[in-house]
Image (cartoon, rainbow, N blue to C red):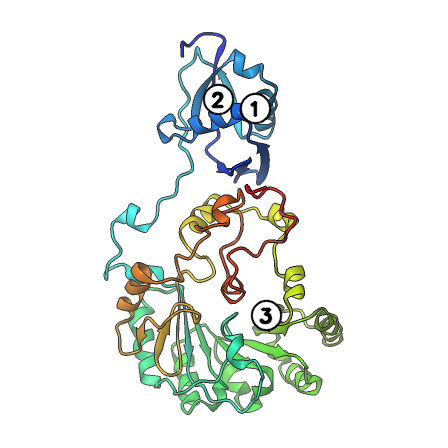
Amino acid sequence: MKQNQTTYWLSILPSTFIFEGDKYVLFYDTDFKKKIITKKTNNIEKIIKKIQNINQLYCVLINQKDLEQSDIKDWIKQMSNNYMAELYPAICSKPVTIPPIMKCHEELRGDINESNILVLLNELTFHINGLCSQKCDLCSKYKKQFNCCYKNQGELPLEAIKNILNSILYTTPSLKINFNGGNIFLYSQIMDLLEYLKQNQLKSNIYLHYINWNENYYQDIYSCNIYLHIFVNFPIQVDFLKILISHNKELDKRIKFNFIITSEEEIETLQIIINQFKIENYSVLPFYDGTNQPFFEKYVYIGENEIQEESPSKKDIYKRQKFNMNDMGKLSISSDGKYFSNLNFQSLGSIDDNICSIIQKEWKEGKAWKRTRNQKPCTECIYQYICPSPSNYDLILNKIDLCQDEIKYKSSI
């Protein structure tokens, strides 16, 4: 195209992502957290196709005739008003813009190897035992949907736990360390474990069912840098909960309650309990029991409003394109000594294996850390990487996208 005063450079700003569907295009600016959704007309599609060519560096020539087309004119005006694009007379040099293209570890530093593999690990959970006297009907199913205590065979030797931690702590100082179980207070070496945590001043997290709380260990936990994560399922035994709260006021800032719910009625009951006991630090964990599909569709499935409220950073989008942000960097060891990146997938090996080899296996062959929205119907949706990474709920419900039916801008519409 001959460059003259009726020719212009259309330059897209480097903070703007383009997500293209069959009928719509989403432009998302990570600096101002703004979204523009444009219907893909033939005219606009031709320009976007040129822009998407990496060799164009997010800048293409358009002429006066293009700008006289109402769809192109309105689109460029909207982009310009929202600081996502700029229009320059072509008499100036072509603006250079670096498109927002992700690079992952291999592309930046070469293959991950034993010397740098531990950089990928950010959370390690030890299920130290599987013994528990409680009879939760859905015990074995909770663990498939969220990190929770569960009954199992075996008990992890304390020496094995120490060896693993001692081998990685200096390399991964920001590692989140969790201890879970059946009832961890029935772990045969619980006092020795608490003493080890105290001596090494290790910040760690302990997970347990609220009825399994044992007041005899209060002082030991209080003297360590330990945070308690307490699971509460319905029907709630209010007397137990009341005792736990009243006896642990000094630990208040180090306790988080995790309420497992399955219905709207439980939400209403939970609100009464939270107000009654003035519980401030808590989370709500929806649980799919196989019969509460309508509840999940209402409270867990994502709708258009929720997606519009999502405002991921540039780094967030890069990560979501390559990694599952719910699972990435996480490993757990079951009480019978098996490594998992996600309990919904097969074991990666045993506690006798070198942890670096376990991480390497998940990095190269695993199904959890790199489980992204890279398959239909997500690949046909303009919100593909605006949406959070797939969760365990997607696996349990055997549904790739937990989208409500009113999502308007799926490309299939």
Residue sitting at x 56%, y 87%? 212
Which element is circle 3 on? loop
Type of the residue with mark 1? Ile
Label 2 near label 1: C-beta < 8 Å? yes
Look at the image and tell me in which quarter the C terminus lies: top right
Mark 1 nearby-residue class (10 Å; few <14, some 14–19, many ≥20): some
Residue 108: x and y in percent read: 30, 46
Does residue 320 sit above or below 296 in this rendering?
above
Disc 3 to disc 1, how far (Cα)?
A: 45 Å
Judging from the image, what secondary structure is the residue with disc 1 in? helix
Closest to the observer: 164 or 10? Answer: 10
On screen, residue 175 versus residue 264, left or right, reads: left
Query: At x 72% / y 68%, what residue is drawn?
Result: 264
- The answer to which image quadrant residue 327 occupies is bottom left
Instruction: Locate residue 151, reporting x and y percent.
Output: 48, 85
Q: Mark 3 points at which residue?
A: 288
Q: Which type of secondary structure does the marked residue at label 2 adopt?
A: strand
Question: Which image quarter is the N terminus in?
Answer: top left
Are the residues at dot 3 and dot 2 in contact (C-beta closer than 8 Å)? no
Residue at the spot of label 2: 10
Mark with earlier residue (3, 2): 2
Mark 3–mark 1 CB contact (< 8 Å): no
User: Percent x, y for residue 269?
Assistant: 74, 74
Whichever of callouts 1 and 2 sits on the residue coming sooner in the sequence is: 2
Point out the tag, 3 or 1, that comes first from the N-terminus: 1
Q: Position of residue 16 (x, y in %)?
A: 50, 35
Mark 3: few, some, or many residues within 10 Å (few <14, many ≥20)?
A: many
Where residue 76 is drawn, which disc sits there?
Answer: 1
Q: Which residue is drawn at 25% across and 49% down?
A: 110
Name above or below for residue 59 compared with residue 168: above
Image: 374 above or below 37: below
Could you say which is closer to the camera, residue 286 or residue 284?
286
